[in-house]
Amino acid sequence: MKNQPVLSTLGLQLLALLSQQQEGASAAPADRLVERARVLLMERCADQMPVEEIARELGVSYSYFRRVFKEKTGASPKQHQMALRIRRTQDILTNTDKPIKEIAALLGFSSAFHLSTQFQDLMGCSPSEYRRRSGSLGE
C-alpha cells in the first residue's frame, strides 16, 4: 500500500500528541485548550476548515484562542495549521509519486500553485525540488 508510510507517520504523531495530552491532564486550562486544539488541527489539517471554527468548537473566542495558542506554541493557529499541511506534503512527496496537483487537492490547498508557494515559503525550495533531494519514489 503506497500510503502506508504516510499513515504510519500520522498515526505516530497523533499518538505522541495524545500521550502528551494525558500526561498534562492536571495542566492549566489554557494548556489543555492548546493541546486539544493541536490534536484537532492535526486531525483536520487536510480540511479547508478555518481555524476560527476550532475556537468555536472549543467554546472560546477566536481572539482568546489565538493569543493563548501563540503564547504556548510560538505560532498562530493558522501558522501551525500550515506547518502541519506542509509536513504532510513532505511525507507524501517522500513516500509516493503523486503529482503536486493531486497532493494539493488531497490536503485542501486551492491549487498546486498555492501549495507550491506555501511550500517554498516554509521549506526554501519547491515541492519538486524537495522530492528530488529526498530521493523519493518520484524520481
Image: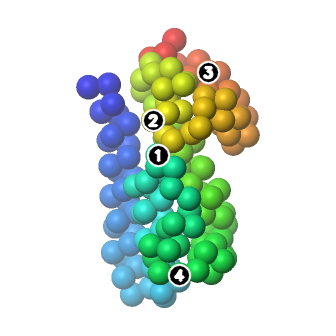
Eye-nearest disc, 3 or 1: 1
Q: Where is residue 111 shown, x and y percent of the image?
A: 60, 32
Disc 1 vs disc 4: Cβ atoms closer than 8 Å?
A: no
Q: Is residue 136 above or below residue 86?
A: above
Q: Secondary structure at mark 3?
A: helix
Q: Where is residue 14 shown, x and y percent of the image?
A: 36, 56
Amino acid under disc 4: Val
- Distance from the alpha carbon under mark 2 to that under mark 3: 17 Å
Q: Residues within 10 Å of mark 2 (few under 14, many from 20)?
A: few
Amino acid under disc 2: Leu
Quarter location, residue 22:
bottom left
Disc 2 vs disc 1: Cβ atoms closer than 8 Å?
A: yes
Q: Residue at x 42, y 63 (%)?
A: 39
- Distance from the alpha carbon under mark 1 to that under mark 4: 23 Å
The mark nearer the N terminus, 2 or 3, is: 2
Q: Residue at x 64, y 72 (%)?
A: 66
Q: Residues within 10 Å of mark 3 (few under 14, many from 20)?
A: some
Q: Secondary structure at mark 2?
A: helix
Mark 3 — residue?
128
Mark 4 — residue?
60
- Distance from the alpha carbon under mark 2 to that under mark 1: 7 Å
Q: Residue furthest left?
A: 1
Question: Which numbered tag is attached to residue 46?
Answer: 1
Q: Where is residue 4 shown, x and y percent of the image?
A: 30, 33
Amino acid under disc 1: Ala
Amino acid under disc 3: Ser
**Relative depth, front residue between 103 and 29:** 103
Q: State the count of labels.
A: 4
Mark 2 — residue?
106
The mark nearer the N terminus, 4 or 3, is: 4
